[in-house]
Image: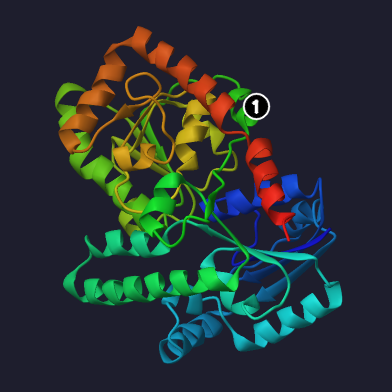
Amino acid sequence: MKLLILTSRFPFPIEKGDKLRIYHQIKELSKYHDICLCSTLVEELKKEHLNEIKKYCSSVYTFPLSRVDVYTNILRSQFINLPIQVGYFYKPSIKKQMLQVIEQERPDHIYVQLIRMAEYVKEVKIPKTIDFMDAFSVNTKRWASTANPLMRVVLNRETRKLKEYEEKTFQYFDHHTIISEQDKEILSIDDRIEVIPNGVDFQYYQSFPPQEKKYDISFVGNMGYKPNVEAAKYLVNKVLPIIKKQYPNVKILIAGARPTKEIKQLADSNVTVSGWLDDIRTAYAESSVFVAPLFLGAGLQNKILEAMSIGVPCVTSKIVNNAINAKENEEILLAENPAEFAEKVTFLFENEEVRIKMIKKAQKFVENQFSWTTFVLKLNNILNRP
C-alpha cells in the first residue's frame, strides 16, 4: 500500500533516538510498502543524507523551518494552546503544503512519529497511526524536578499542556504505538496503545573489530539533549571523584553530537569530550565499561543495547533497565546513587571473569530480544488494519 510517514526531523544521519527509530522502521517497512516521507527540517539537509533515505522512499518532501519560523511557532503556540514541543514544529503554511501532498499522493495509511506532527493531519479522514514513542509529559515533569525555580514554572506548565495534548491526540488516530511497557504505563491514556520497542542492528555492532582500550569508562549520546547532559555531569562530577580515590588515572570518554558548553567544560586529564564521531562504534569498543547514570527522560535507551552488542559491560539505572528488562547482575549492573555506580564500575574493573560472562550473556540477550525485523513486522501488522 502507499504509506505516508510524517517526521519532525529528517531520519538521517542517525544522531538522535527518534531518528534511529524511524530510520530503521522506514528501512524495514519499505519491504512491504510504497513509502512517501514528509519531514520538517530545522537543520540543513545534505545531499548524501537525502540520498540515503531515497533508497527506501518513492517520494520525499521536506519543509524547512528557519530560526525565525521556530521562534514565531513557539510564540503562536501560546495563543492556540499547544505545548511548546508541538508548537515548535507547527507552521500553518506547512500544513497547507502537507495537505496538498496528501491530496497528490493519495496514501492508504498515514504513520505519524511523535505528537509533534499530529496537528498536521489530525482532521485527515484516512486511516492513521501515531507513534507516541516516549511519554513526553513524564519526561518534562522529570526535567522540571531538577530545574531552577523560574524554569520549573515553565516546565510544569508545559507538562500540563503535554498531558492534555497526549490525551487529546489519542482521539485523532485509529492506532497508537509506544516504545516500552514502562512508557505505556506512565502515559496511562488507554490500554489500546501497543508497544513497539526499538531494535538494534546486532551484527553491525557485534562485527566491529576489537580495539585497544583507551578508556576505562564511556558514555555516549546526543550531548545537546538535557537527560544526556545531566547524566554526563553526574558521571564526571559525582561518580568519578569516588572512583579516582582508588584509580586516580581512570579515563572517561564522553562521546556524541552537539556537546553543550557544560559538557565541553567537563574535559580534563581524566575526561575526554570527543563530540561527533563518524563511527560511534569506536566509542564503545575503545572502552572497558559503559556507564549510563540516566534518571531523566523516558523511552528505551538504545545506547545500552549498542554497548551490549559490541561487547562492553553496562552499568545503568533501574529506570533505564525497566524499558529493557535485562537480568540484573547477569546481563547488566544497576545503581541508583554515586557510591553504587562507583562500586559497580570498580567491581567490573577488578573481576575479569565476571565481566567476560556478563558480556556474553548480554550479547545473547540483545540478539534474541531486540530484532528490528521482528518489531517492525508487528508495526506493519498494525498499519495494515482498517
Say above or below: 59 vs 184: below
Q: What is the three-letter code of the residue carrying label 1?
A: Gln
Say above or below: 335 vs 7: above
Residue 149, image x and y in percent?
17, 72
Foreground pick, 63 / 266: 63
Foreground pick, 307 / 375: 375
Residue 183 in view of the camera: yes
Say above or below: 57 vs 209: below
User: Residue at left 71%, top 51%?
Assistant: 26
**Outermost bottom residue:** 79
Residue count near mark 1 (Cα–Cα under 10 Å), binned few <14, some 14–19, many ≥20: few
Residue 207, image x and y in percent?
63, 23
Secondary element type, mark 1: helix
Residue 335, image x and y in percent?
25, 33
Foreground pick, 123 / 312: 123
User: Residue at left 43%, top 86%?
Assistant: 81
What residue does disc 1 label? 203
Q: Name the quadrant of the N terminus.
A: bottom right
Q: Is residue 223 left or right of residue 346?
A: right
User: Residue at left 21%, top 23%?
Assistant: 247
